[in-house]
Amino acid sequence: MRFHIAGSADTDIDLSLLSYAHQLVKQLSRKILSEGGGLVITVGPDPVHQIEPSLPIIFDWTILEALDECQKLNLITWPEAQGAPVVAVGLPKWKEKIPDRRIELWERLESSDNLQLVQVDSELGVGGILREKQASFGDILITLGGGPGVNHFVELYLNKKRPVIPLDLPLKKDRLSASEKLSIKAMENPNTFFKCQSTKDSTRAFSRLTLKKQIEIDEFEKRFFNFISRLSKPKAFYVRLLNKDVPEFEDIENYFRNIVDVVIETSGYERFESGLDPSEEPFLNEEIFKNLHYSSLAVVDLTGIRSNCCLELGYSLGQKKKVILMAKKGTKLPFDTKMIPCHFWSVDEENSKRIKNLIEFMEHNINRKPLVS
């Protein structure tokens, strides 16, 4: 999962509280990277506390410091098939806004394979567009402090039914921050913000993340990752031929069970395959499109060229989802799909080779821009 830590503090907030927030963010970021997770950040300016210029009032560069430390210690365990673990999104002229004290750090990270840089279109260089772009890469949102921008992030994530964890650390002077207000709502109605594997645990588990009274950061880390372990994984929706009477079915079934399942699970996803995995929906069409709509990834196999598979591929592309397109070697793709990178798999190779080939294809294509931005 890619975590997105969003928020800010007041420029005149108590220094000890701001220092605690940065220590917390750095330690969580290091743990995320060392446990196979990724991160989403904004790259650009680094506004600081009005009294102590070594303390920023946002957390993006603190996260990059954590990335730098993890690189040096070779701690990053992000799945290869997911591309770079950290996605940095910038507005136009982002590079001009990097402060001098951060240039050396940025140049060191920019040259590594652990960071993907994404720049918002120069004609759309506004905060709302930047937030939409960041949300397209994130699987789970964590908020701290903040105001209207945090509220917008929360709306973007909840609209996709992706978990939001609002922390209640008081980072706004003399008033509740957006994240504190959201934390109150999450306590009242947790299922709106996240889904635990057991819904009975939601309120109790979330209540242990309160930071109204500061606790040792090591203790908070334990509570936080215990909470994360209770959440459902992001879903990968399978689009494929399911008719057992069609000649290609056996090869497709073999490929999905022995190759696709392995790569998807090791990449941190939970699969959903219609007719095979549990569903709450009463009708097949509703099951397909509801689960596809809220999935994080669509894995589309066009072997056999079924009209329903083409329809679901079109829906996925229109929803700007991450899409991995594949087909058995020899498949002649419909005209419009020829322009989309497609992984052609073989029945003649060893499974270890087929797994390696799929991982390499995903690594190079999973974070492509959508057809229409």
Image: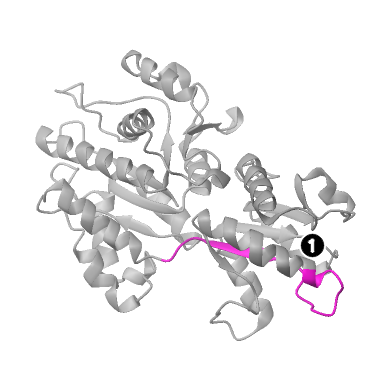
**Residue 10 image point, x, y percent:** 21, 36
Q: Specify whether residue 178 is in view.
A: yes
Asked whether residue 260 is drawn in magenta, I would say no
Q: Is residue 77 placed above or below 274 in the rendered structure?
A: above
Q: Dot 1 lies on which element?
A: helix
Does the magenta stretch mainly form a helix, a strand or a loop? loop
**Residue 21 image point, x, y percent:** 20, 40
Residue most extreme to the bottom: 282
- On screen, residue 340 versus residue 108, left or right, reads right
Q: Residue at x 19, y 49 (%)?
A: 169
Q: Residue at x 59, y 55 (%)?
A: 263
Q: Is residue 266 placed above or below 247 in the rendered structure?
A: above
Considering depth in this image, is 56 or 150 the residue closer to the camera?
56
**Residue 149 image point, x, y percent:** 38, 44
Asked whether residue 237 is drawn in magenta, I would say yes
**Residue 231 image point, x, y percent:** 38, 65
Q: Quadrant of residue 39?
A: top left
Q: Which residue is mark 1?
A: 310
Q: How many marks?
A: 1
Question: Dividing the image into 4 quarters, which one contains the C terminus?
Answer: top right
Query: What crowding class fits label 1: few (fewer than 14 Cα within 10 Å), some (14-19), or many (20 or more)?
Result: some
Q: Which residues are magenta?
A: 232-250
